[in-house]
Image (tube, grey):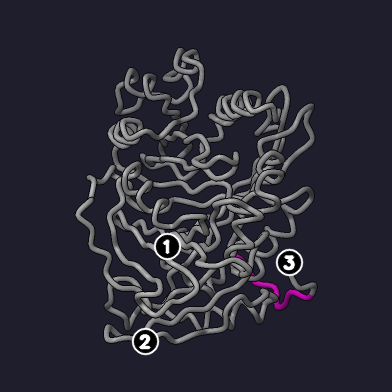
Amino acid sequence: MIKEAIQPQITAATDFLPLQGTDYVEFYVGNAKQAAHFYKTAFGFQSLAYAGPETGIKDRASYAIRQNKLTFVFTTPLRGGNEIADHIYKHGDGVKILALKVTNATDAWEQTTLRGAISYMEPVRMKDDSGELVMSGIKTYGDTVHLFIERENYTGVFMPGYRKWESNYNPAETGLLYVDHCVGNVGWNQMNKWVGFYENIMGFRNILSFDDNDISTEYSALMSKVMSNGNGYVKFPINEPAEGKKKSQIEEYLDYYDGEGCQHVALATKDIVKTVTDLQNRGIEFLKVPTTYYDDLLDRVGAIDEDLQPLKELGILVDRDDEGYLLQIFTKPVEDRPTLFFEIIQRKGAKSFGKGNFKALFEAIEREQESRGNL
């Protein structure tokens, strides 16, 4: 929810909230120990840190895992009747926190709440033998929040309250590097409200827009706007359903997630063929497009460095913009509810998000919806 009075108006050129990138993504899940094991096994993360009763945290258990600059945290409540348990009961496993790296978490909170953000956490200074970490936060769409993390004066493994998590089980990484972008699904007629939130409250700018003419199939449609911070390190596309003959993927998400939330996290790689091959071999399932997609691919996107046959076998999509091209593929939902999934993306200069692939991609999603009886 956004306060009615948003002031002052901020121009896109004013980067009053300098962000250094995504610090971590935190998921509220039914069983954090099992979730961490799954992401280690299937995605190639390594054990990083643990927080729970043994570290003085009495109400929850959290496992932090890392691969290159990519950090995930999985948190589960140890009892019912609290915010974490209620979140899981309503939404199922899902993204709760999109944590952003800043040089001054106090200033970030003051700047955003001054402009109308609803506070989630006032600035908190957390200390241990490894120094001081400052954290603050604001609410965004649905029950999702942004935390601002200042770790300039902290040298510990993750943050106070956590201890190093050492494990004998450390499967090889899969080449995942960092968060490329995180996509949020919002309700009917909510797009402009949240675009305004990111523009006015966080100083982002709208760098790309797609309407139902761009993202539609015979049956369903959606609209999307890509919001980016000043230096381009953080990008949040926002999706809204649009009118169609049948239920769109966004409507299905909103129904099963029981509200607005983070639809997918895009993970960057430098070698998508190797990464996707590794992920498939570990059991990750991906959406597949008809092989006819590749018949005229090079005519549509021009010359690419990669051999076409491996892309075809794996189902990797290709699109080009004025800056270069990108390769991308999307997993099926990684949970029982058809909500959260992941995108694997390799950019070869392209700054866009695969507009040329939308039709093929969403037809693939519709085939999955139809198999669930939800189209």
Q: Amino acid at mark 1?
A: Tyr
Q: Residue at x 73, y 69 (%)?
A: 2
Q: Earlier in the sequence, mark 2 or mark 1?
A: 1
Q: Amino acid at mark 2?
A: Lys
Mark 2, residue position: 127
Magenta segment: does it hold 58?
A: no
In the drawing, does residue 168 fall left or right of residue 292? Answer: left
Range of the magenta residues? Answer: 5-12
Query: Is residue 299 in sight in this rendering?
Result: yes
Which element is circle 1 on? strand
Q: Give how far apart the Cα atoms at labels 2 and 3 are.
A: 32 Å
Say what secondary structure mark 3 lies in: loop
x 29%, y 37%: residue: 271
Q: 162 left or right of 9?
A: left
Snapshot quadrant of residue 115: bottom right
- Depicted 309 relative to depicted 326: above or below: above
Q: Quadrant of the N terminus?
A: bottom right
Q: Position of residue 216 (x, y in %)?
A: 68, 30
The C terminus: image quadrant: top right
Q: What type of secondary structure mainly makes up the magenta span?
A: loop
Q: On screen, 201 above or below 166?
A: below
| Earlier sequence position, callout 3 versus callout 1 | 3
Q: Viewer-proximal residue, 97 or 336?
A: 336
Q: According to the image, label 3 marks what residue?
A: 1
* Residue 164 image offset from top left, x and y in percent: 27, 69
- Which disc is residue 76 wearing? none
According to the picture, the residue beneath numbered tag 1 turns out to be 24
- Taking 256 as reference, is 164 above or below it? below
Residue 21 visible in the shown view: no
In this rendered view, identify the residue nearer to me: 232 or 357: 357
